[in-house]
Image (cartoon, rainbow, N blue to C red):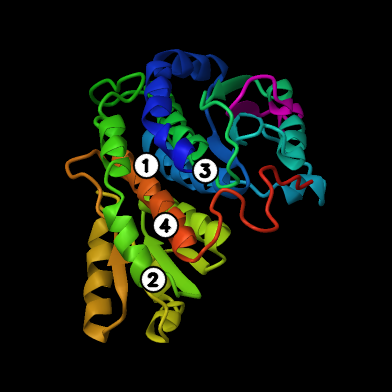
Amino acid sequence: MTAEMAEQPGVLAGVLRRAEADAEAIRAVLPHPLAGTMFLARGSSDNAAVFGRYLVELRSGRPAGLMAPSLYTRYHAEVDWSGYLVVALSQSGATPEIVRTCADLRAAGARVIGLTNLPGSPLAQVVDRELLAGAGPERAVPATKTVTAQLALLVTVASALATARPQTGPATSATGDGELAGLCAAVSSVLDDPGPAQRLAAQWQGLDRLIVAGRGLAYAAALETALKIKETTGILAEGISTADLLHGPIATVYAGAPVLLIEGGGPADTDLADLRNLLTARGAEQGGLPVPQGLPETAQVITAVVRGQQLARELALARGADPDAPAHLSKVTATT
């Protein structure tokens, strides 16, 4: 896990170099007119899909949402998908239900793009275009470099949809120039500075439960950080929107569950500040992990995901666990 986390600046640089060609490939298969975009994924890829759902709806001006594969693999839904773009995310490209659902959706009229890591996967056989993370083999069970590469690829997807949108103002860059400005340097800086994660892990190593809260694009980072902590440590960590936290689940915080606050660097951080003030007033335990300042929101969220990876690893080590191979977990989960 440590070695694969360290590869992220180079992997992300590769995604950025390929962004123009990837955007062109996306535009070539878009339905016209575009009715909307749906995301299909499981696990860490599903958390990346949350990021994509927010970003694509913002950039494309069309609805976007998350799919339920069981509607097709268990309920055998019959839906007309004409005019829709489906973005399927699978790091391995081998999850049976993702592959099968893509085939069904394509047969029902959808255009399908597959985001995966290595070429030649089963997913590649059932999509209109494949976009590769190019992260190389990932051996640790917790996905790290493949997740941040997917997030960067989703910025390319959103930017391609923005350029295909009828323009009412200044033209939008084909690859979202500026959206990921400073990302590789920021991720390198975080990886070179594990101190904040180590200190928080020392403070929280005895936890049995944790709330991870963010809003907007940062909600995806909260979900992914919670998942990494759960799978590496066994701590019952829940990723949640700051808005949803206030609708009842905050009772767990008042009962003693600490809150990790994830800042995204965007307009939703106002809500995070309000939550921080509320927690302080109630004497609830809270923490945060710094990232470099001045980044665009998309770049800050991806960098925050890397900080979350650091914390998960440090918590596992502090608790005497092996972050590379958590008990009872495998790299590919063959849901059908």
Q: Which residues are magenta?
A: 105-123
Label 1 vs 4, first from the N-terminus? 1
**Residue 314 shown left or right of residue 133 in the figure:** left
Tell me the residue at 48%/36% (across/down).
4
Q: Position of residue 155 (x, y in %)?
A: 40, 32
Residue 49, labelled with which disc?
3
Residue type highlighted by circle 2: Trp
Residue under label 4: 314
Q: Is label 2 or label 3 in front? A: 2
Contact (Cβ within 8 Å) of mark 2 with mark 1: no
Residue type highlighted by circle 4: Glu
Task: State the CA–CA distance, disc 2 to disc 1.
Answer: 23 Å
Residue under label 1: 302
**Residue 59 shown left or right of residue 297 in the figure:** right
Label 2 vs 3, first from the N-terminus? 3
Contact (Cβ within 8 Å) of mark 2 with mark 3: no
Q: Is label 4 or label 3 in front? A: 4
Question: Does residue 109 belong to the magenta stretch?
Answer: yes
Q: Quadrant of residue 159?
A: top left
Question: Does residue 317 belong to the magenta stretch?
Answer: no
Q: Specify few, some or many for label 1: CA neighbours under 10 Å numbering under 14, 14-19, or 20 or more.
A: many
Q: Quadrant of residue 180?
A: top left
Q: Quadrant of residue 274?
A: bottom left
Residue under label 2: 204
Label 3 vs 1, first from the N-terminus? 3
Residue 116, labelled with which disc?
none
Q: Specify few, some or many for label 4: CA neighbours under 10 Å numbering under 14, 14-19, or 20 or more.
A: many
Label 2 vs 1, first from the N-terminus? 2
Q: Position of residue 334 (x, y in %)?
A: 76, 45
